[in-house]
Image (cartoon, helix red, strand yellow):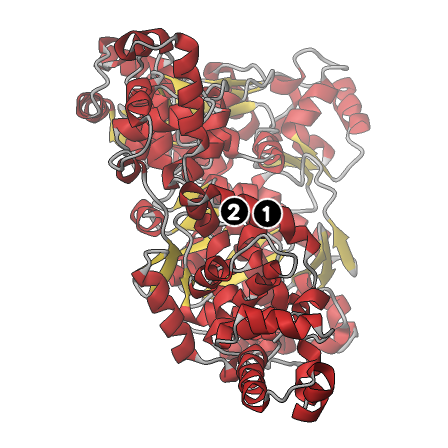
Amino acid sequence: MNKTSTSLHHPYGMYTLLEDGGFTLPSIQKLVNEDFTLYDFKVENENVINLKVSRPSLVEKVNKRINEIDEEIFIKTLYKLASKGISIRYINNLRELGLNYLDIPTLSDQSLFMLTGASKNSMLLKVKKAYELVEEELNNISTTSYSYVLNELFGKLRPKEFLTLMILKEKISKHFKIPIAEVSENEILELLEKMLEKQLIFIQDLRYAKKYKRVEEYIKESFIDKDILIARMNYMTLQEIGDVFELSRERIRQKEKKVLNNVPEIEEVIIYEKVFTEYAWEENLFIDVFNETQNVYRFINLVLKKGKKSLVDNLNILNLKRVQKEKIAKFYNSFINFENNVISYNSKLDFFDHLSFLYGQKYISENEFVEKANDYIFETDLNNENLLFDMTSVRGVVDRSNKVIRTRGNSFRFFNFESLDRNSLEQLKSFLELPTGIYSMLKIYNDNEEFMREIGIQSGYELHNLYKKNFKLENVEYTRMPEFAVGKITKDEFLNNLFFEQAPIGLDDFTKFVEENYGLKQTSLRALIQTDYIHYLDGLQIRVDYLPLNNKDVEELKNLLTKEIYLIDELAKIGKVIDKNFHNKFLNNYALLKVDYHIKGQFVLKRQFQSIDSYFSNLIRKEDYFVNERTNINRTSSFTRTLYDLERSLQIVKIEKDVYITKQKLESAFISKQKLLDFRNQALLFAPENDYFTIHTLKKRGFIHDLEQVGFEDIFYERIIWTDSRVKTIHLAGGSIFLKTDVDISLIGFIQSIVEKCGSINIYLLQDEIIEKYNLQIDLSKVISLSKETNMYYSEELNKLFIDKETFYEEIY
């Protein structure tokens, strides 16, 4: 046993109080038999508090002496022998002879005779036997030794905190510095049984907890001036109580103070002390939130001083369960929305956003929303007619809300625009940096489908609505869904310009060209031309009357064209310098062929190049490396399509952002296309089935290949795998995630697969797991935002993602 703490923690330490008088042996032995220790008095635990009620003078006397006692006094005191039947008179005789407890082992009958002049052999044997018994108990780690550890552990437990048998064994092992295997489980159980009998603790599901008195138990007990306590709980004033008992107001105040000073540890007082003394609780609200009785609130209200902070203003920092917070919010005519913000019901737009989150994760019609929203209002007893919705009010808030997005017809769904990060917003803006013209948003969506999936946009119609509500761009006008205009041009001006650029051209070829480059549907455009622009038609051919050119015009045009390729839109702006009618006069094949240029799609191209695709292909592949400088030409769909096709066919491979190594450079380093294909095939042999993987996980599974000796960054090897049709890819800033599948995948789907395995996970552990397993860093704010558009549930209080809300409720309850 730890000798430095024996006097405090062993019941025998109580015998040191007999050293200087003032205590009787029976009173000390009673305390020892009840397992009291000096430590109990030092910390004034529950046992001492209860003793103080029945024997206050004894407790006071112990407290006065406790600081005078040290380990040396305990070691030397002979009064420990009283525990084994040695009388106080005989112990005092030995003390008068100058002996102490340490002298007993060497004390003989002869030495005792020399001191006293008399032989006391039988008594000496009795003293030595008592000494051996005391030493045995002090030196053995026994139930008595365990007792003070258990008392200390349980003494520190707060309500609703538990200890298991295994935890107790570990604590005892640590305290006595012995292997856990040497701790006696049976002796612990015996002590626990005694504590259970004394109702010091209770057991629940094989876990042990400290037994506290509860308010309802306490007020049923008999104690002095209980009537005054009950009267004060019923909100009677001191004067009113004084009138009943025919006592002065001051006398009642004194009695109340004495009653409250003698209140023992009460479970509810301890549990609610912090939250009650900090915040301003209304009685009915407290009872409802904590499911407590009226007596509990009123008792706590007497014992503790109620706080002044507003509950509803501090709801986000309150350590309460979601359902408890919702009750508080409702009490103050507010609700907790999907972002865990407290919102007043007076804000109908915010209320609409919240209901859209609840019911609009998938498309919902305006009519269906009205029905579900009003049912919610009635079912939750809001009793506020101003909150009710009809078709007109829903249509209005849908157009004003920044948390929903329209699709075709009168349907919409929840989409939180504010969840998009800065990079995503900049990317969306860049998609509309287009040559002058009329476009369909379907083209923007289809050309960037992977990005759209990543941000959660599901169609071109949604994309049109997203831009219209959130991107007010000077050069862009959002016309009838899904069309929009770039460059302040009408559809009539746009078509007239195209007729002059492309004629002579067949009607089918023209509508095909427009759909490929601007996204306008061929069928609709064909019908429009055959109705409103029939004067341009010669049968099924589009023809125009070009303005005549003289030699000066041709020479000016020839001097203007110095590059191999121009965007028509850019050249039209340059050409206005020489002629205000430059577009219709010069931007057509009739004029351009005179200076060895021709129109190809959206471009004016040197005539020596017959195809825009072949021009871009040669441009990209002609050097050892290609750097995409993202000029206006490089942002066109023709260029990006060519770049994409070359990469998919392994004619080029990306080695860093916007930098590509070409096939001829690879072959000069003896890296053939066949070697790239072999790397790709070997990598997929190591790829798991039905699980996500990265370059990092492949290496951990044992994948190696000669190509790695080239020493490129991971992006090079990732892009080779990306070209395989057997995999789908999620591109992140720090690398790519793959899955062998023929179905599109997304970042939130990847996250969901991790959460599904465990039901719930702390987001920081999620981040650590992804770093450790996949060697990738993820943006937690983006994960949280995207999770809100799925069935997953994010708890801000716990910093955890749950696979669904039901799992969240199961865990917290």
* CB-based contact (under 8 Å), mark 1 and mark 2: yes
Q: Is residue 562 above or below residue 204?
A: above
Q: Does the image show residue 408?
A: no
User: What amino acid type is highlighted by mark number 1?
Assistant: Asn
Q: Is residue 676 above or below residue 347?
A: below
Query: In what element is the residue under mark 2?
Result: helix
Which residue in the protein does label 2 denote?
A: 59
* Picture coordinates of residue 33, whole percent (x, y): 43, 65
227 with respect to 666 (left or right): left
Residue ID at (58%, 91%): 121
Which residue in the protein does label 1 denote?
A: 63
Query: In what element is the residue under mark 1?
Result: helix
Residue nearest the viewer, comparing 309 with 254: 254
The mark total stands at: 2
Q: Does the image show residue 82?
A: yes
Residue ID at (41%, 35%): 263
Q: Is residue 150 above or below residue 801?
A: below
User: What amino acid type is highlighted by mark number 2?
Assistant: Val
Residue nearest the viewer, comparing 316 with 109: 109
Query: Pointer 2: residues within 10 angstroms few (<14), some, or many (20+)?
Result: some
The quadrant of the picture occupied by the N terminus is: bottom right
* Picture coordinates of residue 285, whole percent (x, y): 32, 23
Residue ID at (39%, 63%): 757
Residue nearest the viewer, comparing 3 with 20: 20
Q: CA distance from mark 1 to mark 2?
A: 6 Å
Query: Pointer 1: residues within 10 angstroms few (<14), some, or many (20+)?
Result: some
* Picture coordinates of residue 321, whole percent (x, y): 38, 38
- The label shown at residue 387 is none
* Picture coordinates of residue 193, whole percent (x, y): 33, 68
Residue situated furthest front in the rendering:
117
Residue nearest the viewer, comparing 805 with 148: 148
